[in-house]
Amino acid sequence: MEWIKDGNLDFLRKRKVEAREDAQQSVAEIINRVKSGGDEALKAFTKQFDGIALEAIQVTEDQMIAAAARVPKPVLQAIKQAARNIRAFHEKQLPQSWTETVDQGVVLGQKVTPLDSVGVYVPGGTACYPSSVLMGAIPALVAGVKRVVLVSPPQKNGLIADGVLAAAREIGIHEIYQVGGAQAIAALAYGTESIRPVNKIVGPGNLYVMLAKKYVFGDVAIDSLAGPSEIAVVADDSANPSWVAADLLSQAEHDRLSMPVLVTNSEAFGQQVEQEVENQLKELPREAIASESVHKQGKIILTANLQQAADVINQIAPEHLELATREPKEVLKFVRNAGAIFLGKYSSEPVGDYFAGPNHIIPTNGSARYASPLGVESFIKRSSIIEYSDEALQANGQAIAAFARFEGLEGHARAVEKRMKGAVIHE
């Protein structure tokens, strides 16, 4: 891991992953072919990229039942409990419609309406992510979205992973399509013979999925343009170096571009963590991926004190932040930019990834400076409500007309003046 002792955080400028022009061109071609070719294009791309000759695009109820039966019971129980936790947390986020009557009979308010339809992308192929099903779909269901669609690429056996289908069945998602990649994003955005388009697309994916989401944005809404995973741990010498090393590796194993960062005020502690990382890497099944992440992206940042550590965190704006210090809540007071914040030595990052309840679809690449985790508010729209009485218009119409006329919008001014008693209309 690279040590930074002089406060130089220039590495943050290089954090953004720039897509090659050929990748962007490839995504554009895939999307246009799906727009024109529909289901046949989806099947052709699934054969080309996944090596699967799809007979049917949509997953049947019998396939979902069979998949759930193959998932070990302890895993099913974990999925059920995680789903309860995630639902309970997100129910607290649900905004309400409201109106209020103010002076002169004026009624103002807000109408909250769920989106009509949402598509949830779940990564697959060689992996199985039932947690992504729960995190992407449950907030939409809590928001009241009537149609929640799930897409995920098939595995080598030609089927979506059992755990993904089991999680979907557990929370009541039944419209599922076994397609992935940029072609799945195109189908969700523009529709095919089998897949009706949606209003918004959410969920993580590889570079091609991210580029496809970027391409269709504007025609549909998206959650974010997710980059490689990140974890920053602020720790002092009261923390357990073995535990901190394990937490850094929990994100390093995601991707070769993942960024594990330790921020500490103790050089000796940092050296202990560094040694633990090297020791634990040798025992990690995904050693090759984690090792490249640690050695190319990993940082140990030495600060004079924990206040300075918080300042560093606010510049990094990490996706995941652990505060493994004697008084984590004291450090928390100074943190402004982070996606998910884990307090204390027992709050390991995977607790949030799978089980606690808060969403694990979190801003990356420093976007925690201005963005928030996926939540119920990601799946609702707000409409303003304005009702003026005759009394209110007579009292305020002259000011409204003057404002409009000052901006050169005579039609606006006249629309108000025609309703005013005794008003002089400028013809």
Image (cartoon, rainbow, N blue to C red):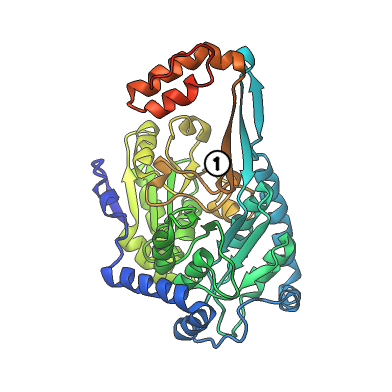
Is residue 265 among what the camera can see? no
Toward the viewer: 240 or 159?
159
Identity of the residue drawn at 56% across and 64% down: 197
Identity of the residue drawn at 43% across and 57% down: 217
Q: Is residue 297 left or right of residue 177?
A: left
Residue to which mark 1 is pinned: 344
Above or below, comparing residue 211 to residue 319 in the picture:
below
Q: In this view, does 335 lie to the left or right of 150?
A: left
User: Where is residue 49 shown, x and y percent of the image?
Assistant: 45, 81
Q: How crowded is mark 1: few (under 14 residues within 10 Å), some or many (20 or more)?
A: some
Q: Quadrant of the C terminus?
A: top left
Identity of the residue drawn at 60% across and 75% down: 194
User: Where is residue 269 shown, x and y percent of the image?
Assistant: 39, 46
User: Where is residue 324 shown, x and y percent of the image?
Assistant: 49, 42
Q: Quadrant of the N terminus?
A: bottom left
Identity of the residue drawn at 36% across and 63% down: 257
- Label 1 residue SS: loop
Q: What residue type is labelled 1?
A: Gly
User: Where is residue 395 shown, x and y percent of the image?
Assistant: 53, 11
Toward the viewer: 58 or 253?
58
Is residue 140 among what the camera can see? yes
How many labels were placed on the picture?
A: 1
Above or below, comparing residue 178 to residue 14 in the picture:
below
Q: Residue furthest front?
A: 427
Q: In this view, does 97 lie to the left or right of 204?
A: right
Above or below, comparing residue 143 to residue 394 in the picture:
below
